[in-house]
Image: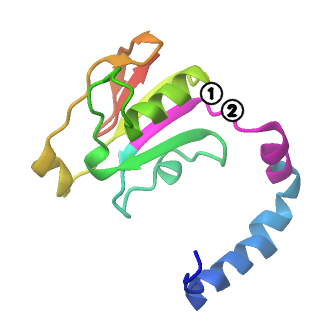
Amino acid sequence: MLNAKPLPTYLLQRYHGWKATTYFENRAWYKRLATEGQRPRAMVISCCDSRVHVTSIFGADQGEFFIHRNIANLVPPYEPDGAQHGTSAAVEYAVTALKVSHLLIVGHSNRGGQGVHGHVFRRRAASRGNLEFCGALDGPAAFRL
């Protein structure tokens, strides 16, 4: 990143404000996350849309969700072809390495990507067998691994 531009001033100000307040007040928690690693209970696949903030929706703390975001919260079919697959790699890591118990796919209304690409989810995760549908809220579909 030889020619990287500096962060915009408003982002630097927000970062310094966060570090002086939230981080300072919760140093022990952040140190624990850094030293012990993440142990999320659930993986969330959600849209990249800036209006979708899944940690706020569920009142989650840092480290509680393993989050993967993409256009229209798409989950393509599992392909054991050795090629690079961002979403399937994230699911495989969450299931096999992090041992998450739940996979939530969170959609939202007034979306552009969903209408263009549709939604594909094959009820299968790499190296872990089938996913069991365990219910839905108004929007998210939750799956138990």
Which residue is labeled 2 in the image?
39
Q: Nearer the viewer's eye, disc 2 or disc 1?
A: 1
- Give 30 or 116, whichever is nearer the viewer: 116
Farthest residue in the right direction?
28
Give the spatial CA distance, label 2 vs label 1. 6 Å
Task: Name the residue rendered at 14%, 41% in the picture.
Answer: 118
Q: How many marks?
A: 2
* Element marked by disc 1: loop
Quadrant in which residue 10 is drawn: bottom right
Residue type at the position of mark 1: Leu
Task: Name the residue rendered at 62%, 27% in the picture.
Answer: 98
Farthest residue in the top direction?
129
x and y, in percent, of residue 74 in the image: 28, 40
x and y, in percent, of residue 73 in the image: 31, 44
Quadrant in which residue 119 is drawn: top left
CB of mark 2 within 8 Å of CB of mark 1?
Answer: yes
For residue 42: magenta? yes
Q: Which stretch appears magenta?
A: 30-45
Task: Name the residue rendered at 41%, 49% in the picture.
Answer: 69
Quadrant in which residue 84 is drawn: top left
x and y, in percent, of residue 102 in the image: 49, 24
Q: Is 128 above or below relative to 14?
A: above
x and y, in percent, of residue 86 in the image: 40, 40
Farthest residue in the bottom direction?
9
Which residue is labeled 1 in the image?
98
Chain-order first, disc 2 or disc 1: 2
